[in-house]
Image (cartoon, helix red, strand yellow):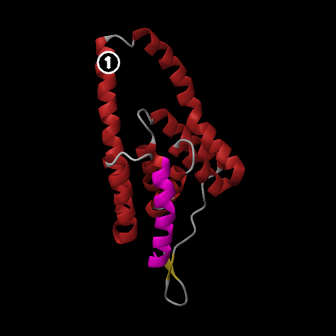
Amino acid sequence: MSVDISGEAVVAAVPGPTVGALFRGFLGLGLMGFGGVLPMTRHMIVEDKRWLSAAEFTDLLGLCQFLPGGNVINLSVAVGLKFRGIPGAVAALIGLIAAPSAILIGLGTLYARFADNPPVMHMLAGLAAAAAGLLISTALKMAAPLRARPVAIVFAAACFLAIAVLRLPLLPTMLVLAPLSILATWKAGE
């Protein structure tokens, strides 16, 4: 960081990732992301590669969750598109899904053969608990940038209440809360 002639801090522009870097980054995520890649995606994009700030990641993921399809799939396309256009989106998407698709085919074949084996059933229960822990950890990290935005906290709590507690369907809940949150955020000037 340097200081310009007016005395204001100037942050040097960091070049965005190349198409190859997008492919390699999301390929690594796909290979390491057993049980869900969202926690690792945030770590890679925000903390490791610094492609996005925590607030940018939260905003972009919010948009991707509202769109149809898998959250991280949507996020890979959005991040690739943001930095390198359509070639970046294609590279990030292929990087994310190539290795897991091949591994899934192999493991699916093994699961079909050994699914009724008690040790395998215990292993799957343990993996599900670990995945839930990773998801809770990511949710807490994603909520951190919202501390200074009370309107966002209110709508995040309302969404949690509607879906997790009241068991309301996701789509109608999002169709009601999304426009209300956009309006409230605009009115609050956040």
Q: Is residue 178 magenta?
A: yes
Determine the residue positioned at 36% across, 44% down. Answer: 135
Task: Tell me if 76 is positioned left or right of 38 in this view.
Answer: right
Q: Toward the viewer: 77 or 157?
A: 157
Q: Relative to residue 34, is residue 74 depicted above or below?
A: below
User: Would residue 50 be visible to someone looking at this image?
Assistant: no
- The part of the chain drawn in magenta is 171-190
Task: Tell me if 93 is positioned left or right of 66 in this view.
Answer: right
Determine the residue positioned at 43% across, 37% down. Answer: 36
Q: Toward the viewer: 35 or 71?
A: 71
Which secondary structure lies at badge 1?
helix
Task: Tell me if 100 is positioned left or right of 119 in this view.
Answer: right
Q: Quadrant of residue 39?
A: top left
Q: Toward the viewer: 125 or 33?
A: 125
**Residue 145: horizontal and vertical position, in percent?**
38, 64
Task: Tell me if 21 is positioned left or right of 116 in this view.
Answer: right
Residue at numbered disc 1:
121
**Residue 187: horizontal and vertical position, in percent?**
47, 77
Determine the residue positioned at 39% across, 62% down. Answer: 155
Determine the residue positioned at 44% across, 9% down. Answer: 113
Query: 10 Å neighbourhood of mark 1: few (<14), some, or many (≥20)?
Result: few
User: Would residue 90 be visible to someone looking at this image?
Assistant: yes
Magenta stretch prevailing secondary structure: helix
Q: Is residue 110 magenta?
A: no
How many numbered discs, if any? 1
Residue lying furthest bottom:
6
**Residue 69: horizontal and vertical position, in percent?**
56, 42
Q: In the rendered structure, which amino acid carries the disc numbered 1?
A: Met
**Residue 35: horizontal and vertical position, in percent?**
41, 34
**Quadrant of the image for the C terminus?**
bottom left
